[in-house]
Image (cartoon, rainbow, N blue to C red):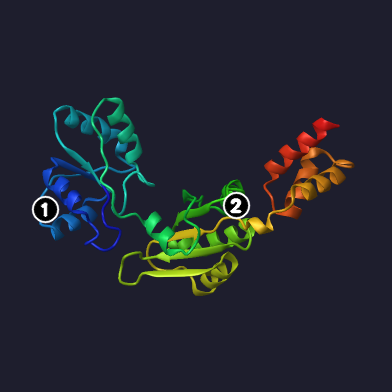
Amino acid sequence: MATPIGNARDITLRALDVLRAADVILCEDTRMTGRLMQIYGLHKHLLPYHDHNAARVRPEVLARLAKGEVIALVSDAGTPLVSDPGYKLVVEAVAAGFPVTTLPGASSVLAALTLAALPTDRFLFAGFLPPKSAARRAALEELRGIAATLVFLESAQRLPEMLADAAAVLGERAAAVARELTKMFEEVRRERLAVLASHYAEAGPPKGEVVVVIGPPDEAAAPDEAAVDAALLAELAHAGPSAAAAKVAAAFGLAKRDVYARAMALKARE
């Protein structure tokens, strides 16, 4: 079930009902969930369930379910299974035939998306990018051609570098950095990627939890397919497909693998 991402009043009445009825509450951090329980006067057995103990705890949880106990799974904040270890537990519970349901509620991903002033009709949640720049740029390269708004979770400390890499790989897209959502110091900064990268490089990492929302590619700026083919044919006249694709991809701001596939298709026609 979803728990508040900052404002304790963002809990649903249904969630409170289930928490009261639960025999055990699985949580990432008993201190975090304990504070929520205290606010609402709930006294329940809290069982830690996180990345470091999940494999050991899952059999115990399944055994409790087999006895007919009601188990509630919560995250520290927001909706479980979104960038947390609950996925494997749900898979095993479903495979074992136990009923599983969800109690929707607060989500930093959807909250940031609705505040970003960017297209919401199609979006991709991509979780956390790799911490190292080279791997991060490679991951962004894979996402560059997706015609959708991109949503990322990010460490505040890595935010300046992440934005710089995003600007270098994705270009001058509109973006938003949302932090401390639903809390007293909630802030949403909306600018082009390069401007945001420059701001946080100068101001330093912000405080609080961060969600980055990046707009889709500008369709008006998308290169003409005929122009890409013409450039590829010119390069293929004196270079191999890989070298030709690399040069044309860089010139048009496209993913190399896509251009390489096009180069191979053109070669096959010869």
Give coordinates of residue 113: x percent, y percent. 43, 58
The mark total stands at 2
Q: Which of these two is toward me, 53 or 187?
A: 187
In percent of width and height, residue 119 lies at 50, 58
- Residue at point 21%, 42% (across, down): 72
Q: Is residue 172 above or below residue 250?
A: below
Query: Which residue ends up furthest to the top in the rendered image?
Result: 96
Residue 233: % across, % down: 85, 43
Q: Amino acid at mark 2?
A: Arg
Quadrant in which the C terminus is drawn: top right
- In the rendered structure, the answer to whether residue 42 lies left or right of residue 138 reads left
Name the residue furthest bottom: 203
Q: Badge 1 local density, few (<14 within 10 Å), some, or many (20+)?
A: some
Task: Kindly state the secondary structure of the residue where label 1 is placed.
Answer: loop
Q: Secondary structure at mark 2?
A: helix
Q: Amino acid at mark 1?
A: Leu
Give the side of residue 15 with respect to residue 111, left or right.
Answer: left
Residue 189 numbered mark, or none: none
For disc 2, the marked residue is 137
Indicate left or right for 170 with 78 as reference: right
Quarter-wise, where is residue 237 in the image? top right
Q: Where residue 239 sits in the image (x, y, percent)?
A: 85, 41
Please state which of residues 181 and 48 is positioned toward the viewer in this rendering. 181
Q: Residues within 10 Å of mark 2 (few under 14, many from 20)?
A: many
Q: Which residue is located at x 63 percent, y 60 percent?
A: 171
Compared across the picture, whether 264 is left or right of 2 comes to right
Residue at the disc numbered 1: 42
